[in-house]
Image (spheres, rainbow, N blue to C red):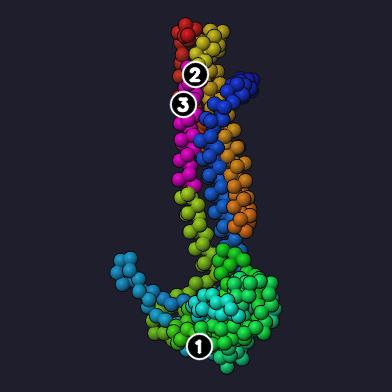
């Protein structure tokens, strides 16, 4: 039996090499299918890794507090509460169990002028703790101080992309420069380090000013966008529980706010990207089935072309099982080679996308094994019928075939 398999593999390669172009065109559907599956699954894994690494890069054990929503009708949600400055001040004064720091921000957009350049940029009013909680490092100068917030000073810090848009050079040191935000002048006191990424890449375009200054001069006395709480190590659940109880009493409504821990966000990202990856891989996997149909078609043609050869083999004593094995092995070899080429091309596409997207290049062994196994299974499944037809040929009729 071992000899029969070895001989069948040798003959399969001989048959493929004898018809190189036809073999390649037959494999093309499998190649494209495997390449697409490997690339999409691996790109999904890489993107997930990039996002989770970014979120994990925030200060440890971060809890985000946002306005809550209430379902008022099927599929219709309505805001149930708003975060006010008084809520922030109450949380900062409460010193809740497990809570280390409390920061907040208010987000908007404003027209900013530096010299003769004017451009709309995202502006954020923030507390002094915000950069530390979000793990955003100062490159030059300083971040917003507590005194800036208390006195509502007209000062600002900028991300590198905001600096490039306003001053024309991403490496320009803007500390000491005066810019106009809306109608008020602000002195730049700091430049933030680059924070590239899918989630935090938007930080680089930010212009950050004191929260109190934003309310007084730029955005008005509207609600806060979010409150960010840094919990003590290994005390996230304690901090989340104390936050929930305190805010429920403070806002008189448990639905007026929502809490999202760092781990909850990571889990949600993993679930969403996982579902999308499986969905896209399933869709592209259809091309594997198309490739399998192409293999079956060519194998049927091959059986017809080699009818006399099959007749001679059977006349010389070849059993039906030997003929069946030979054609099944040819089909599996065809699809297996297509799978290997598809895996290589899929890895290349994944690497190229990872370079462009600036996220980790991730190819998991399970993905490669599954893709190759599926491609071989396609060859086996779609090769059975042509192989059975070959095995069931009558040797006398086969020898008469012209």
Within the magenta stretch, is there residue 285?
yes
Give the residue pinned by disc 3.
Answer: 297
- The answer to which quarter of the image holds residue 103 is bottom right
Query: Which element is circle 3 on?
Result: helix
CA–CA distance between discs 2 and 3? 10 Å
Q: Tell me the residue at 50%/52% (across/down).
A: 277
The image shows residue 162 at horizontal and vertical percentages of: 59, 73
The image shows residue 179 at horizontal and vertical percentages of: 59, 83
| Along the line of sight, the residue nearer the viewer: 206 or 149 | 206
Pointer 2 or 3: first along the chain = 3
Q: Could you classify mark 2 by the number of other residues whose Cα lies within 10 Å: few (under 14), some (14-19), or many (20 or more)?
A: many
Toward the left, the furthest residue is 73
Q: Tell me the residue at 53%/30% (across/down).
A: 25
Give the residue pinned by disc 2.
Answer: 303
Give the residue pinned by disc 1.
Answer: 217
Within the magenta stretch, is there residue 298?
yes
Query: Which element is circle 2 on?
Result: helix
Is 33 above or below relative to 58? Answer: above
CA–CA distance between discs 3 and 1? 73 Å
Please tell me the numbered disc located at residue 29. Answer: none
The image shows residue 251 at horizontal and vertical percentages of: 41, 84
Query: Which stretch is magenta?
Result: 281-304
The image shows residue 88 at horizontal and vertical percentages of: 50, 85
* Badge count: 3
Pointer 1 or 2: first along the chain = 1
Which quadrant: the N terminus? top right
| Along the line of sight, the residue nearer the viewer: 234 or 75 | 75
Classify residue 330 as left or right of residue 249: right
| Along the line of sight, the residue nearer the viewer: 145 or 119 | 119
Foreground mark, 1 or 2, reads 1
| Along the line of sight, the residue nearer the viewer: 274 or 286 | 286
CA–CA distance between discs 1 and 2? 82 Å
């Amino acid at each position: 039996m071992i000899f029969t398999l070895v001989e069948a593999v040798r003959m399969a390669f001989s048959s493929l090499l004898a018809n190189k172009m036809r073999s390649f065109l037959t494999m093309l559907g499998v190649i494209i299918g495997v390449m697409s599956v490997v690339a999409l699954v691996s790109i999904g894994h890489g993107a997930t890794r990039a996002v989770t690494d970014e979120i994990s890069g925030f200060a440890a054990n971060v809890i985000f507090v946002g306005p809550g929503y209430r379902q008022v009708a099927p599929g219709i949600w309505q805001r149930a509460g708003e975060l006010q400055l008084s809520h922030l001040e109450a949380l900062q004064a409460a010193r809740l169990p497990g809570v280390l720091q409390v920061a907040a921000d208010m987000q908007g957009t404003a027209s900013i002028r530096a010299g003769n350049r004017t451009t709309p940029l995202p502006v954020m009013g923030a507390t002094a703790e915000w950069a530390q909680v979000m793990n955003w490092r100062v490159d030059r100068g300083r971040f917003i101080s507590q005194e800036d917030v208390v006195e509502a000073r007209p000062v600002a810090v900028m991300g590198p992309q905001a600096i490039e848009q306003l001053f024309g050079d991403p490496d320009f040191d803007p500390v000491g420069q005066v810019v106009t935000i809306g109608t008020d002048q602000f002195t730049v006191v700091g430049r933030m380090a680059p924070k590239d990424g899918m989630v935090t890449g938007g930080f680089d375009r930010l212009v950050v000013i004191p929260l109190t200054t934003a309310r007084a001069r730029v955005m008005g006395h509207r609600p806060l966008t979010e409150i960010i709480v840094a919990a003590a190590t290994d005390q996230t659940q304690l901090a989340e529980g104390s936050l929930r109880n305190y805010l429920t009493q403070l806002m008189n409504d448990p639905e007026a706010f929502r809490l999202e821990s760092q781990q909850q966000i990571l889990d949600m990202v993993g679930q969403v990207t996982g579902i999308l990856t499986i969905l896209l891989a399933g869709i592209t996997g259809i091309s594997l089935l198309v490739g399998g149909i192409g293999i079956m078609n060519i194998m049927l043609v091959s059986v017809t072309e080699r009818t006399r050869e099959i007749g001679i083999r059977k006349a010389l004593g070849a059993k039906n099982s030997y003929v069946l094995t030979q054609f099944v092995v040819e089909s599996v070899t065809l699809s297996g080679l297509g799978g290997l080429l598809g895996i290589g091309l899929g890895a290349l596409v994944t690497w190229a996308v990872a370079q462009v997207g600036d996220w980790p290049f991730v190819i998991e062994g399970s993905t490669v094994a599954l893709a190759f196994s599926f491609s071989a299974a396609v060859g086996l499944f779609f090769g059975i019928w042509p192989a059975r037809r070959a095995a069931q040929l009558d040797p006398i009729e086969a020898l008469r075939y012209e």
